[in-house]
Image (cartoon, coloured by chain):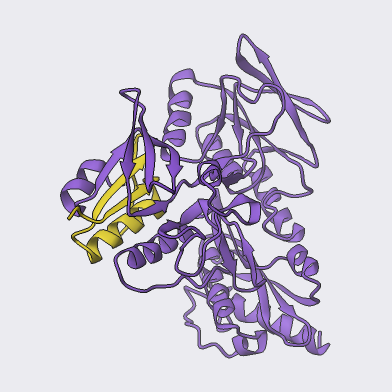
Amino acid sequence: MAKERLVVIGGDAAGMSAAAQAKRLKPDLEVVAFEKGPHTSYSA
Amino acid sequence: MVTPAAFRDDYGIDARVLHEVVEIDLKSRRVLVRSLEEHKEWWEAFDHLMIATGAVPILPAVPGSDARGVYGLHSLQSGITVRNVVDTEKPKKAVVIGGGYIGLEMAEALIMRDLDVSLVEQASQVMNTLDPDMGALVSDALMHVGVELFREETYKGIEVSDGRVKAVVTNHRTIPADIVILGLGVRPNTELAGRAGISLGVRDAIKVNDRMQTASPGVWAAGDCAESFHLVSRRHVHIALGTIANKQGRVAGINLGGRYATFPGVVGTAVSKICAIEVARTGLQEREITSLGLEYVVGRIESTTRASYYPHAGEITVKALAEKGSGKLLGAQIVGVEGAAKRIDIFATALHAGFTVEDMINLDLSYAPPYSGVWDPVHLAVRRAAAALTGRL
């Protein structure tokens, strides 16, 4: 069975906070984030 | 800042920069991705979709807003761009349009880089998230550091020469400019979500519930593109701040990770600094209270940031607003020198707790002369408000 997949649109505070939390709690989740700008950001 | 490489190596997240999602297909559970470097597009499948598209600067439809030398600020990259322009093109005259957080912080930054800075504000005072009497203190501080301030003037357009900004035109004057900063606020960046049929709410922000779910199953949203619930006005609002974005993102992520978390709402807390002056606000301001049909009293005091006799004690003005009858705290604003602003967090916490100003008088706050008088300025303001409630002014 294919892995469960989360797509995140936007690589700033909200998007990457969600991505990091989800991945931490569910390590099997495949997480892909798309950011249109040149930077991503996150404060743990 | 965390780089895409760190996200991959430390977090196991595949973060791809310079990749724009240009379409959401809810029916087939996929998004159309465009690589901005390779100029190609392809579809990516999802089981869950998290929308965190942020906010974008409001660009007024006036002539010249797209000229070279005109900048909005909403991302790390846009800040870097302006800094590079100041470094390499050495502009001398800057005009900032709009006296909100972005406008004021940019005015400060440009003054520190020795530019001549003018600021155009449509209202009677800058910082319209404060009541005008508190905003006036910020206007004074701006002029004190050398910003030329034009209040009650409307931005009409930009004079352009050879594709470059030459001057800013208001309804009263023409101000020569080498660089222009647009600080007219932001709007939720939700065109993509709206086109996909995801429900939008106040100011076109994405509608979400307490768990940060949108009305579309499996689709979540958080941050500057999403609505928040205001715990004092009990209404949905759109407030674009990183404080809220991080908390909403965390809640969405916990739910996406299979647990259960909620984000109850916000009270509208914000803080800023303009040179030596600290500015803070939380809750509702007079205009908002009136528009809800509520009546209120004001407790406004001038005091000092430390015990009055202690070295480096400086001015602080605190204003507390309380509902007539119930005495419930509705909001507060603070303007003062170093040490003033973070006192707003006491008021913010009191708003979350639903305290009355009478409750706040007996709060066991810390005291020693380097930090405050034995009655903190916060105590003094709520005492004044409580006195106004009972008519013992």
Closer-to-camera residue (B63/B92): B63
Image coords of residue B329 (percent x, y): 66, 79
What residue appears at the point 74 percent right and 50 percent down from the top-left corner? B125
Chain B image colour? purple
Q: Does residue B82 lie above or below B135 as drawn? A: above
Closer-to-camera residue (B21/B134): B21
Q: Does residue B383 lie above or below B11 as drawn? A: below
Q: Quadrant for the C terminus of chain B, please.
A: bottom right
Q: Does residue B255 lie above or below B175 as drawn? A: below
Image coords of residue B17 (percent x, y): 32, 36
Q: Is residue B104 visible?
A: yes
Closer-to-camera residue (B258/B84): B258
State the residue lying farthest toward the top.
B162
What residue appears at the point 76 percent right and 57 percent down from the top-left corner? B132
Image coords of residue B203 (percent x, y): 64, 51
Left or right: B27, with B207 as reference point: left
Q: Which chain is drawn using yellow? A: A
Q: Quadrant of residue B376?
A: bottom right
Q: Does residue B316 lie above or below B3 as drawn? A: below
Q: Is residue B276 visible?
A: no
Image coords of residue B283 (percent x, y): 63, 69
Q: Quadrant of residue B165?
A: top right
Left or right: B70, with B62 as reference point: left
Q: Quadrant of residue B217?
A: bottom left
